[in-house]
Image: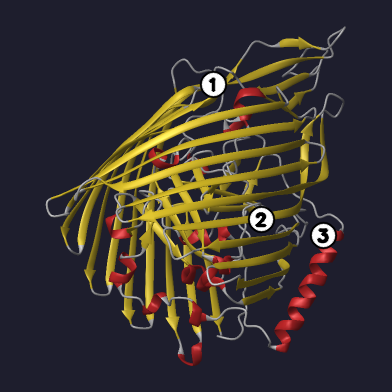
Amino acid sequence: MNDRTNPHYLERGNDPIRLSEMVQRRKARARLADDFQEGKLTMLFNRDHKTGPVKRAGRIFLAGFLSVLLAGSTVAQNPRNVPDVTAMSMEDLMNLQVTSVSKRTQKVADAAAAIFVLTQEDIRRSGATSIPEALRLVPGLEVARIDQNKWAIGSRGFNGRFDNKLLVLIDGRSVYTPLFSGVYWNVQDVMLEDVDRIEVIRGPGATLWGANAVDGVINVITKKAKATQSAVVTAGAGTEERAAGGVRYGSKLGDNTYYRAYTKYFDWRPSVYPSGVTAHDGWDALRGGFRADWTPAGANSLTIQGDVYRSRFDETLTVASLSAPYSNTFPNDGKYSGGNILGRWNHTSEGSSMSLQMYYDNTTITDHSLFGDHQNILDIDFQDGFHAGNSQQFVWGLGYRSIHDKNDASFTVSLQPNQVTLNQFSTFLQDEISLVDNRLQITLGSKFERNEFTGFEIEPNARLLWNLTPNQSIWTAVSRAVRTPALTEEGLRLNSQVIPPGTPANPTPLPAVVAVFGSHQFNSEDLLAYELGYRVQATKNLSLDIATFYNNYSNLRTAEPGAPYPEGSPAPTDFVIPFVAGNKMSGGTYGVELFADWKVVPKWRLVGSYSYLQMDIHKNIDSQDPTPDNPNGSSPRHQWYLRSSVDLPKHFEQDTTLRFVD
């Protein structure tokens, strides 16, 4: 099913110039958010629902927060506990530690990839209240808000609500759903005060992270429990986000065991169109979770963490119908609920480290009158890294994932079979070789996976980093990545439109159902990526980062028309005009991403970014997909932003961001 035939497809996430300014005090902070970004949908708008028990409980919960804050007994955010980025040197920023590129700790300056680190200080000073809002600060990342409860986030093209080429992890737990090969962004949430950093790789990361890490990897990494040994209360209210609050408490059990627990609530009112009409996209959520770290003096450590959540959202649906007027528009409400539990054991010794991680994830989606899905995922991952001599670092791993999915159908959306269990096995290996006094690094590796849809997949890459001088480096990479089929691409039936009988488009006496189908012959989408980058610390106070890329795609998804056929028993009630998922689109994208960081004076930092994207995607000559070539409208060609961070006297801070997307 092609995004452009999907009724939820985002045609364009318009993102006009946005100017936000925030002044923060050390003992109290006010957040102003006006982040509604206008987007076009072919079918979905949203509707507010009546206040339910979750909302009432949340507001009682928030009232308690406000009373605590007004009493002045708890500090919402203490800047003394967070590294001040304006006080960090350019060398410190280039030496930030990351793990997403090679699954081991390394400096940003030593990573042969287009990686960006969003620090806790960046998030705090941005005023962001959610992970998607914070991701607007990442150079080259495409972030568009469709309505109050839906986002479209992508990297290097093909952006949309159901972007299927971006892998997202939270503390090593993949939140990429196999239902449609994407991310439910309105479900992904944490206490932002507990985020240590967000590592974002623009470009493929499949060699280490596996299938579906095609155009990027987002890795949200929270702080260790030992770093959150305090009580934190946050609260806010406004015209868009009516109420929001959170509580986190951290302490320890004995000398080597630390823990924290949190709960969080928010309620967004429906947005309003310029005409004054309500968009019916209200949204509220209540969630909680914990983390416990056991860190004895020896070589072992153990982490256990988990979350539970419940969220309600409103929307207006327009769905097809077999009776006149052959489409219905009505207010609808939906629910997300679920939870996860994760355990991770680490063992380190001189020259080596290994880890074993296991998690269970449960998600239930109830979109009343449309679709329901119940998903259980068990994931086990083992990794071992060691030095092979003085100039080689080797890492390898094994993985297993079991997915059980059961769905509830409607006339509009159904999956066959409606219950399925999938098993996936994987292994990876990567060797990093240092040459020429560690100035030249060569990285070779590959992922090997077996899935039940397309069988065996190989995802190799080769990367090279050359340190020209201590302050500048150049890197290049060639990688292959695949996006494996989603459940919808195998067994979907989506009745997207009913053409009335006796009309020019359908002169027959029966209604014609335009339906999109999955296919067991659908193959993995394939990417061959070429990247080239340059980093330099030009002066003590100025650093530059440039990344260029060319992506060659094949086997991209199309919707191929089939022969119409009658439907119904014993006598036909309608006939079906099918469009079946195919792999008859290919082409290339290329672009450049620039980032500059300038410390003008000790207490004033300027950060700027510009990205350019060109897409040249076309259907193969044998494709009969009626949709146009080149889905350029889904991703902006030009993006830039400028951010100013100033430390003012008396512990005031001023942060201003100017953004433009075209």
Q: Position of residue 619 (x, y in %)?
A: 46, 24
| Numbered mark located on residue 307 in the image | 2
Contact check, label 1 and label 2, Cβ < 8 Å: no
- Measure how far apart labels 1 and 2 are at the Cα level: 35 Å
Front residue of this view, candidates 284 and 435 = 435
- Measure how far apart labels 2 and 3 are at the Cα level: 17 Å
Amino acid type for the residue under numbered disc 3: Val
**Image point 21% across, 56% down: which residue?**
473
Q: Nearer the viewer, mark 1 or mark 2?
A: 2
Front residue of this view, candidates 180 and 310 = 310
Contact check, label 3 and label 1, Cβ < 8 Å: no
**Image point 81% across, 69% down: which residue?**
59
**Helix, strand or loop status at disc 2:** strand
The residue at which mark 1 appears reads as: 522
**Helix, strand or loop status at disc 1:** loop
- Judge from the rendering whether residue 449 lies leftward or rightward of residue 268; answer left or right: left
